[in-house]
Image: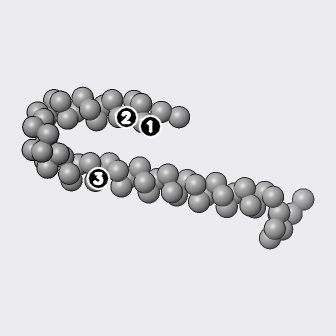
Amino acid sequence: MPITANSPTRSIGVLALIFTACNATTHGFSIFLYSALLPEIRQVFELSYSQAAFIAALLQLFVSAP
């Protein structure tokens, strides 16, 4: 069965591509943004590096969970 321009298979593939691109973009942006803002975050909240690392680890465990 050939895939036509308006077939459900094509539509699902396009949606999967869009969602994957959005997920990759936002995940990458959040990683680099956190790293760039870490010195200011530490200064404002008076955190040590170990406290900031612990918070980042908790965020990875609970926010990124599927």
Q: Is residue 51 above or below residue 34?
A: above
Give the mark nearest the N terminus, 3 or 1. Answer: 3
| CB under 8 Å between discs 3 and 1 | no
The quarter holding residue 59 reads: top left
Residue 49: x percent and y percent?
13, 34
Residue at point 14% right, 49% down? 40
Judged left or right of residue 23, residue 48 is: left
Question: Could you give the CA–CA distance between mark 1 and mark 2, rounded to whole angstroms?
Answer: 5 Å
Alpha-carbon span between mark 2 and mark 3: 14 Å
**Residue pictured at 21% horizontal, 53% vertical:** 36
Residue with the mark numbered 1: 64
Q: Which residue is mark 2?
A: 60
* SS class, disc 3: helix
Residue on which the image places disc 3: 32
Depth check, front residue: 22 or 1: 22
Query: Could you tell me which residue is drawn at 9 percent across and 37 percent down?
Result: 46
Circles 2 and 3: CB atoms closer than 8 Å: no
Cβ atoms at labels 1 and 2 below 8 Å apart: yes
Percent of width and height locating residue 30: 35, 50
Which secondary structure lies at badge 2?
helix
